[in-house]
Amino acid sequence: MEPMAKLLLCCGASVAIYKACDLASKLTQAGHTVKTVMTPAAAELISPQLFEAVTGQSASVSEFGPARRGAMDHIQLGQWADLILVAPASADLIGRLAHGLAGDLVTTAILACPKERPRVLCPAMNPGMLAQPSVQRNLKQLGSDGWTVVQPEAGHMACGDDGLGRLPEPATLVLRVAEFLRP
């Protein structure tokens, strides 16, 4: 079976990253080719090797050092992707994307992706962080820039708080990805 779409899963540092592994697995099972890029802080929470195990594709944190796969990994990844999916999107990653900052493989690969390709952002953070005016401004800016922002769910958070900020369940996000890929 030929892959349905080439998806670049971009992971920020959020406790919700454990759901991103399940998401990557479910997207692969649905027939998509999924490559993962992670911020360095995200790689402190979970190993890129777990994403490689569930997708059978590369998972990268940096385009420098011994794990380097090519001279311009960020360009190759950005141009390869049919869709960019940022899940989980931390407050830090959202802010850097909203301001066009490119200081790691995640942000440079996203900037290298042709602007007409779908870009989907899934915020996941503490309710108090999500409610901050600066975070809301950055999300609004990304929406104006053509990103689709998937609203987080309400519920109990890992920090013990309750409220809006949970990454939607992987099965829900798989269905949303299918919607974004329809012609």
Image (cartoon, rainbow, N blue to C red):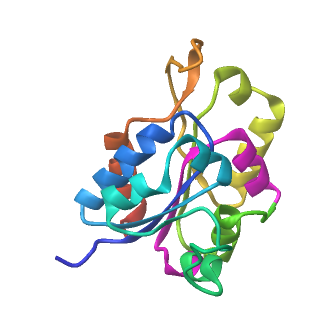
Q: How many marks?
A: 0
Q: Residue furthest left?
A: 1
Would you place residue 117 above or below residue 154 in this image?
below
The residue closer to the viewer here, 99 or 10, is: 10
* Residue located at (53% from left, 66% from top): 118
Magenta-span inclusion, residue 79? yes
Seen at 35% across and 44% down, the residue is: 22
x 56%, y 41%: residue: 45
Work out whether residue 124 can be spotted. Answer: yes
Rendering coords of residue 177 (x, y %): 39, 55
Left or right? Give the position of 2 relative to 141: left
Q: Position of residue 46 (x, y in %)?
A: 51, 44
Q: Quadrant location of residue 128?
A: top right
Q: Is residue 17 left or right of residue 129?
A: left
Would residue 140 be visible to someone looking at this image?
A: no
Q: Position of residue 36 (x, y in %)?
A: 48, 62
Q: Is residue 4 rendered to the left or right of residue 162?
A: left
For the record, the magenta segment spans 78-99
Rendered view: 47 above or below 163: below
**x, y percentage for residue 182?**
36, 66
Q: Please state which of residues 169 and 16 is positioned toward the viewer in this rendering.
A: 16
Quadrant of the image containing the N terminus = bottom left
The residue drawn where x is 74% and y is 44% is 92
Specify the farthest residue to the front.
Answer: 66
Quick check: 102 left or right of 61? right
Decide: is 38 above or below 124: below
Which quarter of the image is occupied by the C terminus?
A: bottom left
Q: Is residue 25 magenta?
A: no
